[in-house]
Image: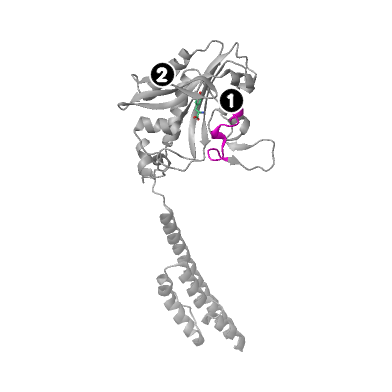
Amino acid sequence: MSTVANLPDSMEPLQHLLANAPAQIDATESLADLDALEAELVGKGSPIAQARRGLGGINDSDERRDTGRAINDIAAQLTELLSTRRSQLAAVEEASALTADRVDVTLPGRRPRRGTHHLITQTIDEIVDIFVGLGYTVAKGPEAETEFYNFTALNIPETHPSRLESDTLYLDYGERDEEVLLRTHTSPMQARYMEEHDPPVYIVVPGKVFRADAVDATHSPVFHQVEGLAVDDSITFADLKGTLAEFARQFFGGDTKVKFIPHYFPFTEPSAEMHAFTNGRWIELLGCGMVNPAVFEQVGYDPEILSGFAFGMGAERMAMVRHGITDLRALIDPDERILEQYR
Ligand code: DAH
């Protein structure tokens, strides 16, 4: 390190400072270290600043000038050393920041877990798809329904027990002309759809239905149905049987046998239950029948010209029969170990 020529004696401490500075500066490991050292070497409280303040006390003008120059020279050298080190440290800090931020593009990505439709949804979709394949379209109706569409329009008498609060969940909207309830079946869409559309009608209606039941192995206050309605000018019971037998073959397998057992529903006449032979036994699958002329009259269809059939099935029931599930609660339980089996 250069020294300063013709140095007055009073410059001895500064000379010493300059001699030690390079080692000190080199020893700094960060910009923060360097800032601290800079304050110490050339800052306001540094020996250099003190020496500058002492200049005024030197009476001899030559000596004052020489001393001033010497101080400036030392200060300039220190500043130069500090600034060189500053560039070095800045480069090192930038390099390590870049390393820390580096993204390893060769790492394998994190795969999100793949979701799936619930078995009930899959079942509804499959049922609907079969009927769409037979030329039906999909219609949807409201879950909050009026007493008229849920019961009256379907020829269900005022005194029918299913209208009781013990069976049906009524909604309280205060004083109104008509009771509003949670639909107990998807059948109300039969009347709603026919009111809005001219024949022919070929629709399926999937959706939620509600009943005042507690949950057990075969009951739930909320479940799903798929309703069907076909109305045209010459539909017979043979069409009903052929259509639903074809549905059973597509849903359960090519050689599935079905049989129709007489039953009673107010909105169909005659009515039947369709049973299918699966897993070694006969099992009831759905309700069906020829649309009751009284329903046609309610919606302004001419029963002299038109005929049709209707059916309604429970989606949970279809899934349970197909998969041999004996407890409905397995479908409601959000336990992934159960649901995973039906991916
Ligand atoms: N709505 C009936 C129920 O919930 C099922 C049903 C039976 C629907 C016969 C129909 C039908 O369309 O024709 O039990």
Q: Tell me the quarter of the image containing the N terminus.
A: bottom left
**Magenta region: which residues?**
151-169
* CA neighbours of label 2 inside 10 A, class few (<14), some (14 to 19), many (20+): many
Vertical relation: 96 (above or below) 28: above
Q: Which residue is mark 2?
A: 245
Q: Which residue is mark 1?
A: 155
Vertical relation: 57 (above or below) 143: below
Residue ID at (58%, 26%): 154
Q: Is residue 44 visible?
A: yes
Closest to the observer, 279 or 142: 279
Q: Tell me the quarter of the image containing the C terminus.
A: top left
Q: Could you tell me the amino acid type at mark 1?
A: Asn
Q: Could you tell me the amino acid type at mark 2?
A: Ala
Percent across and percent down for residue 67 are 55, 82
Residue 153 is inside the magenta segment: yes
- Cα separation, mark 2 vs mark 1, equals 27 Å
- Number of labelled discs? 2
* CA neighbours of label 1 inside 10 A, class few (<14), some (14 to 19), many (20+): some
Residue ID at (55%, 38%): 168
Q: Image quadrant of residue 266?
A: top right
Is the magenta region chiefly helix, strand or loop? loop
